[in-house]
Amino acid sequence: MSDKVIDSGKKLDGPTDTATPVTDPAAPVTSSSTDTTTPVPVIDDKGVDPAAPVTGSSTDTTTLAPVIDDKGVDTAPDDKGVDTAPDDNGVDTKPDDNGVDTKPDDNGVDTTPDDNGNSNAATATPAATSATTAVTVTKGDDGFEHRHADLSNREVHGSEDSHNAIQGSTGDDLITGGSQSDVLEGGNGSDDLSAGSGDDILVGGGSDDVGLNHLEGGGGDDILVAGGHKTKAFDDLFASNDALNKAIHADAKFADLASIIDDSSASAVAQVENHFSVHSGNGNDLILNFHAETDKIVLDRDLNGSTIEDAASLMEHLVIDGSKVSLDLGHGNSITLVGVDASNLTESNFVIV
């Protein structure tokens, strides 16, 4: 269904209220008494079998053993210089015109010796490893598992069995929480934050945040904070609550939130856009530091069985009470913008999809 953005120019006017053993490539194959297989000759780039007996010698009885890779597969070329035995991925590891097998096996090891009898395993290029390495998890005294994204690990997922505190990087991050009550902060950059069914706190980023953030609280009663400079109403909210202010600054989980509180540019133009996605069963969510000039609330049409499907029907659910703007979403679900200048809100701040 295509997004429907309500008329962007209209002001809101709501009511006030285990490994396999490796076979030695050089070892001869032990034949059973019934094995009559003729070994495949190894051909060098001159078309000569260097292991063959000397012509005219009646006493040389050398038997050629096939060259076996570390999976037990014969990768030696046939008498036309072509490797006809596929590796364990079913790939024909055909040698190049120097008789060298240039396709490593699935462990990144070239197990076929070249035409000088030397294995290229020592110089083979290992298979590419994942660019993402494991994120370090630290169990804090606060009962949270702490994870930090960085520019090499920008996709971080929390545990389902613990509270999660995940801090984003200076890049664009994908951060997901679990089913417990989590704290997710995006850091700077365009971040995608998604929580589960607990009562979560999501912060799009710090005061210097730039880009486009997507925040989705999931179920539970969540607190969602827009990244970027603080609004005047947000500043007033924390200036009047010294205890909460101190608690936030004393807890490393809230580094981005503390950065916004400490921001000295309360009237600055937003450098970031925050989108808050709201679905059925969202709970009763609070949204703080909402920038009326850029931020948006994205709602599902008819969510929770409500009648919200356009601008007119949205107005029926809207209640403005000073610096709080609430939307009743039906069946005990709601969203409330806390510390917002309602006079600056327009219908363009609400998108119905």
Image (tube, rainbow, N blue to C red):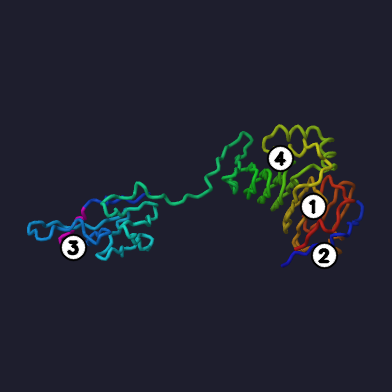
- The residues tagged by marks 4 and 2 sit, at their Cα atoms, a distance apart of 34 Å
In the image, which disc is placed on residue 35? 3
Principal SS element in the magenta part?
loop
Nearest-to-viewer mark from 1 and 4? 1
Is there a contact, CB below 8 Å, between mark 1 and mark 2? no
Q: Which residue is mark 2?
A: 310
Q: Residue at x 78, y 60 (%)?
A: 351
Q: Magenta stretch containing residue 55, yes or no?
A: no
Q: Residues within 10 Å of mark 4 (few under 14, many from 20)?
A: many
Identify which amino acid the numbered label 2 is placed on: Asp
Magenta residues (range) = 28-38
Q: From mark 3 to mark 2, how far is it between C-alphas?
A: 80 Å
Q: Amino acid at mark 3?
A: Asp
Q: Is residue 232 above or below residue 276?
A: above
What's the CA distance linking mark 1 and mark 3?
78 Å
Amino acid type at circle 4 is Asp
* Residue depicted at x 82% and y 58%: 348
To which residue does mark 4 refer? 256
In the image, taking residue 46 as reference, residue 259 lies left or right, namely right
| Pair 1/2: label in front | 1
Q: Amino acid at mark 1?
A: Thr
Choose between 236 and 37: the one closer to the eye: 37
The numbered mark, 1 or 3, whose residue comes first in the sequence reads: 3
Of callouts 4 and 2, the N-terminal one:
4
Screen quadrant of the N terminus: bottom right
Position of residue 68 measured from the top left corner of the image (x, y, whole percent): 28, 56
Asked if residue 352 shows in the view, the reply is yes
What residue occupies the far bottom of the structure in this picture? 1
- Horizontal side of 116 relative to 203 (left or right) equals left
